[in-house]
Amino acid sequence: MTSDQSSLFVTDLAIYPVKSTRRLPVKQARIVSTGFDHDRRWMLVDSNGKFITQRQHPKMVHIVSVPDERGVLLSAPGMNDLQVTYPLVNQRSLVTVWSDECAAQDAGDQAAQWFSQYMGLDCRLVYMDEQCQRIVDQRYAASDDLTSFADGFPFLLTSEASLADLNGRLEEAVPMERFRPNIIINGLEAFAEDRWQRIRIGSVEFRVSKACTRCVMTTVDTQTGKKGKEPLKTLASFRKGEKGVLFGMNLNHNSEGVISVGDPVEILA
């Protein structure tokens, strides 16, 4: 490790047990084949099996999902808490995340009713078990790289220095949770992560696959659930790539293991 990397470390980790619900900060995270254990293994779908997110339904930001040994515990404003257990009956349905399809397990009528009542639309909760495998976009990954119900990659890494640079350009600062990262780091200059190809956190090596293209979910206020124009409008003025506005880096991992807040980050290439 060179001297300019000596202070580079992990400042925060998070998972999102049900896709597009509120972030759940963790001090330590176990890495499995699809990314962080318990990250985005559950997902809401409509009657056609298509994924549902905050992009269309910002109120999802108020749903709290906490994994436990039985499954996942749900809470939301105006709703009674609901314990959802891992599906015991092999009732599968074909679900879609962007252009990917896989046969997920249905979580049952009680969960569907709970979400439908809160969301105000017919929807169902599904679970990704070991039989439901989703391969990462092969343009940016190895043939055996897997992910969960995340938009496309197992991990999203963001930098506190990069957020500080962005907030210095905004009239009103935005919190990092707007960008829904799994791994937050600090210790180098803003957007230094653009140049990385491989890094090591603790004992786990990661490939930096591509810059993350940002969408309207970053404009959802995580406290009120309301949409605005920022930070996308300002990001577009200085972080626009060929395929969209960029913030954060998508990662794939070379091995399983455990990483923790405070772990050093080593730039390998």
Image (spheres, helix red, strand yellow):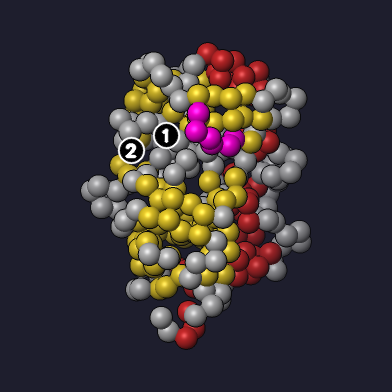
The disc at residue 134 is 2
Determine contact: label 1, label 2, CB under 8 Å: yes
* Outermost residue toward the front in this view: 69
Residue found at x 60% / y 70%: 161
The answer to whether any part of residue 143 appears in the image is yes
Q: Is residue 160 above or below residue 43?
A: below
Residue found at x 39% / y 16%: 89
| Left or right: 256 as drawn, with respect to 124 | left
| Left or right: 252 as drawn, with respect to 224 | left
| Left or right: 58 as drawn, with respect to 142 | right
Position of residue 33 measured from the top left corner of the image (x, y, whole percent): 34, 46
Q: Is residue 127 above or below residue 184?
A: above
* Residue type indicated by callout 1: Val
Position of residue 169 measured from the top left corner of the image (x, y, whole percent): 69, 66
Q: Nearer the viewer, residue 108 or 176?
A: 108
| Left or right: 74 as drawn, with respect to 149 | right
Position of residue 140 measured from the top left corner of the image (x, y, whole percent): 31, 54
Q: Which corner quadrant holds the C terminus?
A: bottom left
Which segment did they paint magenta?
65-70
**Picture mark count:** 2
Residue found at x 54% / y 24%: 84
Q: Return the residue at label 1.
A: 97
* Residue type indicated by callout 2: Arg
The answer to whether any part of residue 56 appears in the image is no
- Secondary structure of residue under mark 2: strand
Residue 122 lies in magenta, yes or no?
Answer: no
Indicate which disc, 1 or 2, sits on the residue closer to the N terminus. Answer: 1
Mark 2, Cα crowd under 10 Å, few <14 / some 14-19 / many 20+, is: many
